[in-house]
Image (cartoon, grey):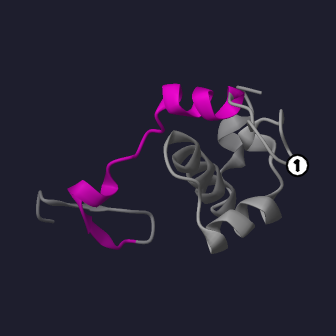
Amino acid sequence: MNNKFIDNEANAEYPVEMAQIVQPDKKALITLAITKMPYGKYKGLRLVDLPEPYLVWFSQRGFPKGKLGEMLQAVYEIKLNGLEFLFDKIR
């Protein structure tokens, strides 16, 4: 076996760079978990608790500009990829 590759459980070889585990940014997750929607129908609701259809609506029509839009897009991606468990210990 070449040192630049590692074996996984399925006996497939992947470059070492691909095998590195990605760790979520804890500070960013905490910020997403505590930030509340500042306006609209869901004003006051934490971004992580926004209904998925609302986030899908934003993804289709465009997220707001600035930090809020970036956070809404991050929450959308987290929910889309089934990673909501990342907030379980923070909530």
Instruction: State the image coordinates of residue 87 (x, y, percent, origin top left).
Output: 69, 36
Q: Residue 68 vs residue 12: left or right? A: right
Q: Residue 59 vs residue 66: left or right? A: right
Q: How many marks?
A: 1
Q: Residue 7 vs residue 41: left or right? A: left
Point 83% across, 32% down: residue: 44
Towards the viewer: 79 or 34:
34
Point 69% across, 56% down: residue: 79
Tag 1's secondary structure?
loop
Instruction: State the image coordinates of residue 10 (x, y, percent, origin top left).
Output: 44, 71
Instruction: State the image coordinates of residue 4 (x, y, percent, origin top left).
Output: 13, 59
User: Which residue position holds label 1?
Assistant: 41
Residue 10: within the magenta? no
Towards the viewer: 72 or 18:
72
Quadrant location of residue 63? bottom right
Towards the viewer: 25 or 34:
34
Say if 56 sits above or below 64 in the image: below
Tell me the quarter of the image containing the C terminus: top right
Q: Residue 5 vs residue 63: left or right? A: left
Towards the viewer: 71 or 79:
71
Residue 17: within the magenta? yes
Tell me the quarter of the image containing the N terminus: bottom left
Q: Amino acid at mark 1?
A: Lys
Point 85% across, 45% down: residue: 42
Residue bounds of the magenta highlight? 11-34
Instruction: State the image coordinates of residue 38 (x, y, percent, origin top left).
Output: 74, 36
Quadrant location of residue 19? bottom left
